[in-house]
Image (cartoon, rainbow, N blue to C red):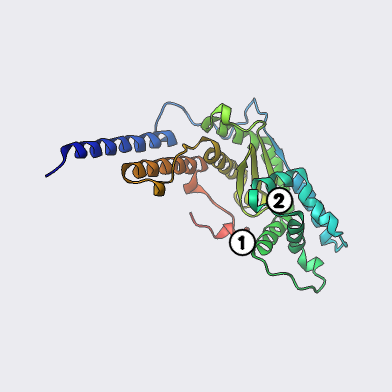
Amino acid sequence: MINHQVLHHKFHTFSVLILLILWAAALSGCGGDKAAPDQTRKSADCPATIDISGWHAFTALGDRLLASENVPRADLEAYALEPAVMVWRESMLTLSPTPTKLGNWVEGAFWTEQGDGRKQKLDADRYQYAESLRLSYDHRDRINQLLEKFGQEGVCQTLELARFWVDQEKMPAPFSVTLLPTKPELRSHAGHLIADTGMLLAGGGAQLGRQIVGVLYRDVQAQQGKSPLDVEGGASIAQTVRVLMNEGTAAWIEDMPHTYFDAVHPRLGKVEL
């Protein structure tokens, strides 16, 4: 015998979920009466800035290492104490590299010049970071051009897009993007927005700006809830829809279908979306 009360409850739950999905689609730009911001126009009210002090500290250190200068170990480890680098390290929480470890990674990026016949320690993090750091250094002229353009207009367009998707009280204050060489990654942590210079090189400023806002949205604006795996039945379905709504909106912000990375990047250049 069919339990009509249970059937009615399930149908009602299903109907609510359908409405949630439709609402999520509208939120993601498929409807509504609010026009998306013009990403080609620089905002007249633009308190946004970029912090490239960590980038300059790294390239200066790289110039010394590339010249085969005998850089003291203390100088390598001091890089980790640069304010911008500290911001990045703090965003990694328990995985934050020590000054000694980060100094090893920087040295590893210039091992051809600095190795002096020594055997380099086999370590996955050391290899991956060294590869990424050296990529940024080797393309520093192009990255400097991109940073200049991003500082002039890209960061303002990023702020404008963020204002559209993120509630004012949840916006980082001040709105500043820290760019420095790391692994290919973006971070939003405690009001700090952090981006890898290699990602700027591979994808350009406009794409990076959208990706930064997508990360910020996930961090501060996305609807919170339980994991769908931690609940059952209709509650699990509802939590699944919540996750899909959050990720779908972030992907819309990032313009995921049109994401492109130049082959200059040995890792991102192989990504097919």
Measured as percent of width and height from the top left, residue 207 is found at: 57, 44
- Front-lying residue, 123 or 264: 123
In the picture shown, does residue 221 fall above or below 108?
above
Task: Give the vertical position of 29 relative to 260 (above or below).
Answer: above
In the rendered image, the quadrant that contains the N terminus is top left
Which residue is at the far left? 1
Q: Where is residue 210 in the image (x, y as percent from the top left)?
A: 56, 41
Residue drawn 64% across the image and 25% down it: 44
Which amino acid type is shown beneath numbered disc 1?
Answer: Pro
Name the residue located 64 percent from the left edge and 40 percent from the top edge.
193
**What is the crowding at mark 2: few (fewer than 14 residues within 10 Å), some, or many (at least 20)?**
some
Q: Position of residue 9 (x, y in %)?
A: 24, 36
Q: Residue 142 carries which label?
A: 2
- Marks 2 and 1: CB-CB under 8 Å? no
Q: Compute the Cα span from label 2 to label 1.
A: 16 Å
For the point 82% across and 60% down, the residue is 65
Give the residue at mark 1: 266
- Tell us which disc is closer to us: 2 or 1: 1
Instruction: Tell me the kind of residue under disc 2.
Output: Arg
Q: In the figure, 30 relative to 34: above or below?
A: below
Q: Could you classify mark 1 by the number of other residues whose Cα lies within 10 Å: few (under 14), some (14-19), or many (20 or more)?
A: some
